[in-house]
Image (cartoon, helix red, strand yellow):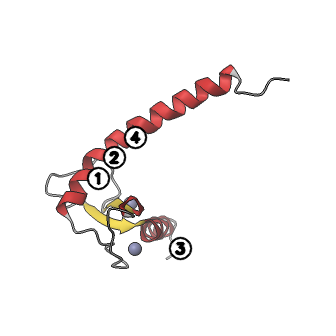
Amino acid sequence: MTVGKKPDAARLDKIVAEARRAADQRDLGYRERSLKMYPWVCGRCMREFTHTNVSQLTVHHRDHNHDNNPPDGSNWELLCLYCHDNEHSRYLEADRGLV
Ligand SMILES: [Zn+2]
Ligand SMILES: [Zn+2]
């Protein structure tokens, strides 16, 4: 038996990698701009970030529309991964009328 990837898996890997790259590039635009615009502090828990852990600081869209990226940054909020997650689950619960 040979060890290694089947052709199918390799093709799937490539598709996934390409989709991820496209998402990364879209994300790069507003992420880089918002990181230049705002201090590296989570807007909820006020945790501060540096170059070593800034990957855990994410850009939240206040209106939850990722395509709404006004140049003045008014739709962005920097949140750590934990608070960002929290923010979205809160939003979903509100949608379902649970809050
Ligand atoms: Zn936080
Ligand atoms: Zn968000």
Q: Are marks 4 and 2 in contact (CB under 8 Å)?
A: yes
Q: Nearer the viewer, residue 93 or 73?
A: 73
**CB under 8 Å between callouts 3 and 1?**
no
Q: Are marks 1 and 2 in contact (CB under 8 Å)?
A: yes
Please tell me in which quarter of the rendered image ligand 2 is found.
bottom left
Say above or below: 28 vs 7: below
Q: Position of residue 68 (x, y in %)?
A: 26, 50
Horizontal and vertical percent position of residue 63? 31, 60
State the CA–CA distance, disc 3 to disc 1: 31 Å
Q: Alpha carbon of mark 4 to alpha carbon of mark 2: how far?
A: 6 Å
Kindly identify which numbered label has been placed on residue 27. Answer: 2
Q: Amino acid at mark 3?
A: Leu
Of the residues shown, which amino acid type is indicated by label 4? Answer: Ala
Q: Is residue 31 left or right of residue 12?
A: left
Q: Residues within 10 Å of mark 3 (few under 14, many from 20)?
A: few
Q: Label 3: which residue? A: 98
